[in-house]
Image: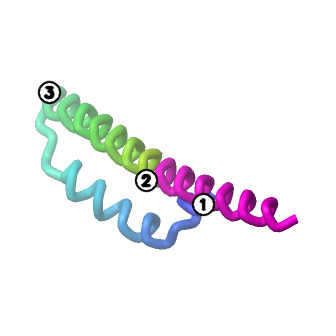
Amino acid sequence: MVGAVNPCGFAMLPAYLGLYLGSGDTDGRAHLLGHIGRALVVGGLVTAGFVLMFGVAGLVNGIGSRSVVESFRGLA
């Protein structure tokens, strides 16, 4: 949920995609297919990075939360 409203993501995503996909001239189908292939690779890598980053953050948060809950259970 945080990633969907991340202000850095909204500001940087167009610049990031513009950098990697480029706005070069397309003189034919081969160039268009190359751009589409590169767009799919960049999109896949961005998605994998997003899932990995938030997955690791979720695991760390979950482990930390569990240890806090267990420590409070020991006090009761």
* Amino acid at circle 1: Gly
Nearer to us in this view, 1 or 34: 1
Q: Given contact means CB atoms under 8 Å apart, are the residues at marks 1 and 2 in contact?
A: no
Residue 6 falls within the magenta-colored stretch: no
Q: Which residues are the magenta region?
A: 54-76
Label the magenta part by its dominant secondary structure.
helix
Q: Secondary structure at mark 2?
A: helix
* Amino acid at circle 2: Met
In front of the other: label 3 or label 1?
Answer: 1
Residue underneath mark 3? 30
Q: Residue drawn 79% across and 61% down?
A: 74
Residue 63 falls within the magenta-colored stretch: yes
Q: Secondary structure at mark 3?
A: helix
Q: Position of residue 41 (x, y in %)?
A: 28, 36
Residue underneath mark 1? 64
Q: Position of residue 10 (x, y in %)?
A: 46, 66
In screen coordinates, is 57 left or right of 71? left
Q: Position of residue 59 (x, y in %)?
A: 54, 50
Residue found at the very far right of the displayed protein: 76
Nearer to us in this view, 1 or 65: 65
Number of other residues with Cα within 10 Å of mark 2, as a class: few under 14, some 14 to 19, many 20 or more: few
Q: Earlier in the sequence, mark 3 or mark 2?
A: 3
* Amino acid at circle 3: Ala
Q: Secondary structure at mark 1?
A: helix
